[in-house]
Image (tube, coloured by chain):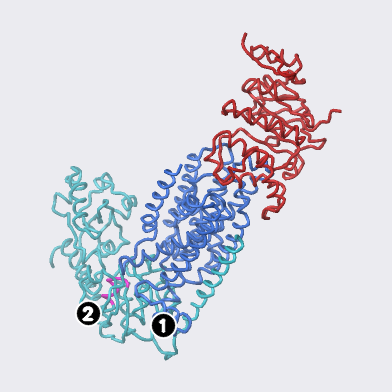
Amino acid sequence: MKKKSMVYAVMLFMIVNMLSGCGKRTGEPAAVMPEGYCFTDALGQEVTVRKTERVVALMGSFAEVWLSAGGSLAGVTDDAFDERGLELSEETVSVGKYNNPNVEKIIALNPDLVLLSSETKEHAALKEVLKQAGITAAYFKVTYFDDYLSMLKTCTEITGREELYEKNGLAVKTEIEEILSRAKAEEPPSVLLLITYSGGAVAQNSKTMTGNMLNDLGCKNIADENQSLLKDFNMESIVKEDPDYIFVIPMGNDDTLAMKNLKESIEKNPAWNGLAAVKNNRYILLPKEKFLYKPNEKWAESYQYLSEILYGKK
Amino acid sequence: MMEIMIRLEDVTYSYNRQPLIHGMDLTFEKGKITTIVGPNGCGKSTVIKLSSRLLHPDKGKVFLENREIGVMKRKEFARSVSVLLQSSYIPDMAVEDAVMSGRYPHQSPISFSSAEDKRLTEYAMEMTYCQSLRNKNMRQLSGGERQRVFLAMVLAQDTPVIILDEPTTYLDINVSYEIMELINSLNRKLGKTIVLVLHDLNLALNYSDRLAVMENGKVVAYEEASDHRVHRCISDIFKVDIRRMTEKGKSYYYSFKL
Amino acid sequence: MGRNNKARLLILLSTGLLAVSVLLGLCLGASNIRPTVLVATLFAGEPDDFLYRILLTVRLPRVTAALLAGSALAVSGAIIQSVLNNPLASPNIIGVNAGAGLFVLLASAFLPADPFLLPLSAFSGALLACMMVLAITMTGRLSRVLLVLTGFAVNSIFSAGMNTIMILYPDAYIGAGNFLAGGLSSVTSNVLVYPSVFIAAGFILALLCSKGLNILNLGSDSAKTLGMNVNACRCAYLAIAAILAGAAVSFAGMIGFVGLLVPHGVKLMIGQDNRYVIPASALTGGIFVILCDLLARTLFLPYELPVGILMSLMGGPFFLYLILKNRRKE
């Protein structure tokens, strides 16, 4: 009896392994034209895109970039609908959440190209599966405006719509440069950039998206020097630095919870109200659409928003 | 002719730098029932464990029929000496499987049970009146039934020497006598060499061929069970008196407080 | 009915149930496939057909992974429980999974990417954790509770190590991709090749050692007096358990529940005889993970729940039922 179970077990494994070994066959794409646009993506892979009729974007912001490059979308993740309010055709299907994409749905859409983020581990995990399924996958990393510009360039070269690169990319760049050249101050203002969520608040330095914008505008971020602020909200350090401006970005799906935390734990602290920024009305809440999500082609507006706060309308 | 089965030669054993036994010489005779008695903490269990290879002496040697047990292969030793320990752990298995596991030293690691194994297991259960219990789980048995099964295990192991550490503790008096009768029959019918540790003096006096009395890690008397020197030693240590009574031609010893 | 017969019946039933589970796992998902279509696609499908692609690149690897991981972890748990003589022990609790995880991360951070290295490093880590717990157990008579606490400590050490590496070397997860994303959602067939060899070997070894494990069930003193080299055997058996758990963790991430619940449940149903417990655990473990994974990815389409949650939800109450049922018996 013992031997029988062993035999069953070994047989079962052999069968299953044989079947799963068959999967390697799908790696070869059907014979297509050798042309296509070739580039290196954020994971260092050589990607060749031949068709662009059916494209799936696994992040709302990438969906937006693809649309502004003149492409159309067969599938997106929920944040494209919920957070961006993009205008998508009725045929566009949801493939799950950006941090929980459903790989079966993606494959079922038979996409020619999938756009993924190299910084999201759930996306990184899909690399092998998509490769085995013979689906072209391109990874991007967008933190700063220049990253957006580079992604837009790649996308417009794929779609062949170079004029959109001009319109949604280069033109924005020019605008930003103008804003930055007008931004002058005798003394660089010091800022504290906070991000709040339901569990607390944490400072961001110049390496983040908004922090980088503030840095471009000539601000000095107190979290650049004081690295501990990046991990813990430390009222003492903040009082000591006494920044000129305090910017707050509410994060998370629920604004109200983040706001609640802000009001109750931070604003009620008497030390907080003693800060210069708070007293002088320079404690500002920044809108998510401009400063939490990637603004993409509206990046210049975000710069403008900050510039007006810092230096007034010019 | 006295044949020696197990011999402790100049054995010292310490635990945490406390010497439990120091320079002890002790022999167990082949084919006899030898019982060790003594107050709690005198080292009886240590002697048992040293004799059964559960402990290794710090100094000195232990011999099994002139072979040093420390260098014997494990399974070889297990085919010569079986041990029933006083342990509170009850395995969760069927009686028949437990008794069958006594055959382990005779089997190769991966083999199934042979016909011989099955026969000896049956025999062991017969001798200990366990057949009716065979499909029950060990944990469902009474104390006495369990001891019988452990005895069956030891019997299935089929060794010339059986060592038992307090086999009657926690058992009712009638069940204790049952067990002692069984142990006795293993010696009388099958010629096994038995080494026992008992706390019940009456059982020790009436079921042993030889009695060793220990105190504070030393053997203070070691004689035939009927020898008055041993009785005097026991009286001194335990502060009891020992008397003999005769019934139907047989002698019985008993202890009591005057 | 005799215990042995009950055991054989369970094994037979489980084999049947396993086949059904595999079928369900292959047919159901974001797109449901009818069994007839399934068979047709498997044997005569076109590479362009999206059903074929889904089946071969997603479902088949995934169901195979669930089967392998579930059965490997269940058998690993059964072995560990026998060796440590402790029904509370399991690969998760004694830190085996965390050990495997740590070494997988170390390998991804410092060694070149090689599909063979991942299960090997997982096994090394799993083995290290096992040995640490065993070494501590052997220093004296540890009560069962202390043993679990020891496992807890070992677990914490390795988990902390893992988190440290993730902070210092954030790129490590790209190589360890599947592992850290957790669960089975992105398993591909090439990741399964080496682990399945280890797991198959582990099963065969476990079955061969079932007699020895039964002897260990008698207690270590009794096992010694029966002539078993208890220490050597414990190490060997734990090594087998580590191979199984390590191989499973290398592609499935940290699925812990199976190793504790499944062997326990099996033992409550058919007793402690490892000759039956081991194959029964393998089959039941496979069924359990396949079904939980199936539910996890189909209950709230297109969203996927983490498998661990499903396993707790399904396994917990069933386990309680088994406990209650057994208490009334005795």
* Viewer-nearest of discs 2 and 1: 2
The disc numbered 2 marks a residue on which chain?
Answer: A
**In the rendering, at what x and y percent does residue B92 appear?**
54, 44
Label 2 with label 1: CB-CB less than 8 Å: no
The secondary structure that dominates the magenta segment is helix
Q: What residue type is labelled 2?
A: Glu
For marks 2 and 1, the one nearer the N-term is 1
**Which quadrant of the figure contains the N terminus of chain B?**
top right
The disc numbered 1 marks a residue on which chain?
Answer: A
Q: Which of A304 and C23 is in front in this view?
A: C23
Q: Nearer the viewer, residue B93 or C104?
A: B93
Q: Mark 1 points at which residue?
A: A48
Query: Does residue B251 appear to the left or right of B240 in the view shown?
Result: right
Q: Nearer the viewer, residue A27 or B155?
A: B155
Q: Which of A277 and B140 is in front in this view?
A: B140
Colour in which chain A is shown?
cyan
Q: Residues within 10 Å of mark 2 (few under 14, many from 20)?
A: few
Query: What secondary structure is found at the residue carrying circle 2?
Result: loop
In the rendered image, residues at marks 2 and 1 fall on the same chain: yes
Range of residues picked out in magenta:
A58-65
Q: Which amino acid does label 1 sit on?
A: Thr
Q: From what the image shows, is residue B58 above or below residue A5?
A: above
Colour in which chain B is shown?
red
Colour in which chain C is shown?
blue
Q: Mark 2 points at which residue?
A: A90
**In the rendering, at what x and y percent does residue A80 appear?**
25, 71
